[in-house]
Image (spheres, grey):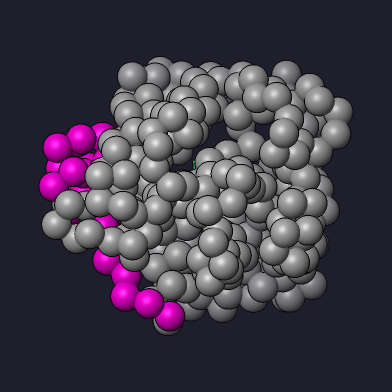
Amino acid sequence: MLVTGKDGQLGRLLVRQLSNSCRVIAVGRSALDIADRRAVADLIGAAAPDVIINAAAYTDVDGAERDSREAFAVNRDGVGALAEAARACGASLLHVSTDFVFDGRGGAPYDEASATNPVNAYGASKLAGERALAASGAKHLIVRTSWLFSECPGNFVTRVFALLHERDALSMVEDQIGTPTEAGFLAEVVGRLLRAPDVFGTETRLLHVANGGQASRFEVAAEILKRILAAGATPRVRHIRPIATAEYPLPAARPSDSRLATKRLRDIYAIEPPDWRTALDGVLARVLPSAERAPA
Ligand SMILES: NC(=O)c1ccc[n+]([C@@H]2O[C@H](COP(=O)([O-])OP(=O)(O)OC[C@H]3O[C@@H](n4cnc5c(N)ncnc54)[C@H](OP(=O)(O)O)[C@@H]3O)[C@@H](O)[C@H]2O)c1
């Protein structure tokens, strides 16, 4: 099995998860730039994996507005290169995509048949990657997920945790809702999917994987604050102010309601996603002890 993007949040957890049960070749950007079509063909041709899991992506949502060429080079052309190389050596490709392919105006959780309509360059580049893969002829599965969090640095939960300790005051938008999803849960689901019979052979080429429940960014931050106070932490911020998106303008627009429906995951694979709050408890239990050990 070959995992790309091994140093990212999901890549790390995937490698940890999959290494228990199979031989994993894990490559980060320095070993394989997926936007380099020749390098992709050479490495995959030489490694001849049975399965490729693509966790590499250009994920800077605001950066993609300024540098959409780079976002498309990685998220569309890089995926296209992986798909071409997979087809050439008969490998199957499990690719990770995003809730940001939707515009957020549907008013209900999006299922796999929902119409896409990204509202920013990042979402457009990820949708273009899905389309490049679907058109490639490679055996594949596209797993869409949303609002990934984990104990690894650089995601919403670890950022809020740090801000609560660094800032005197904190505001969070309350008019964007989604399904927060633990990256470790997604890695576990990927492991289970790969053990399921014929996961790349079914008509199901799209699958939504997210934790249960829903939340606004404000609600996620408030749950973090509540839990760390209960655990005896001493953040500087004791109250988070809910604000509207309009009060905190960013370069990229965000879908206001990008909740993912996971009926297909439950019906076909009998996987019942735990509520995101349960997953948050587990992540904070790992974040809190290491934060206490860190120097002030
Ligand atoms: N994070 C979320 O909230 C979220 C939500 C929905 C879907 N997703 C999707 O989930 C997947 C994993 O996301 P994540 O949270 O793990 O993101 P991440 O932490 O940003 O990891 C992405 C990894 O890809 C690497 N990368 C970037 N450009 C590359 C290139 N040209 N060639 C090879 N590697 C490259 C990055 O390396 P550098 O660090 O060197 O740039 C990074 O290690 C992505 O497909 C993302 O679109 C994420």
For residue 106, side relative to residue 51 (left or right): right
In this view, 225 is above or below 282: above
Q: Residue at x 51, y 66 (%)?
A: 194
| Visible residue check, residue 85 | yes
**Could you tell me residue 260's position as x and y percent?**
73, 43
Is residue 24 in the magenta section? yes
> Split into 4 quadrants, where in the image is the N terminus?
bottom left
Q: Residue at x 25, y 51 (%)?
A: 89
For residue 184, side relative to residue 39 (left or right): right
| Visible residue check, residue 156 | no
In this view, 272 is above or below 103: below
For residue 236, side relative to residue 105 (left or right): left
- Ligand 1 rendered quadrant: top left
Magenta-highlighted residues: 21-42
**Could you tell me residue 190's position as x and y percent?**
54, 63
Q: Quadrant of residue 162?
A: bottom right
**Could you tell me residue 49's position as x and y percent?**
28, 61
Q: Residue furthest bottom?
A: 20
* Front residue of 201 and 113: 201
Is residue 2 in the magenta section? no
Q: Residue at x 77, y 45 (%)?
A: 261
* Front residue of 100 and 224: 100
* Front residue of 185 and 281: 185
* Front residue of 243 and 6: 6
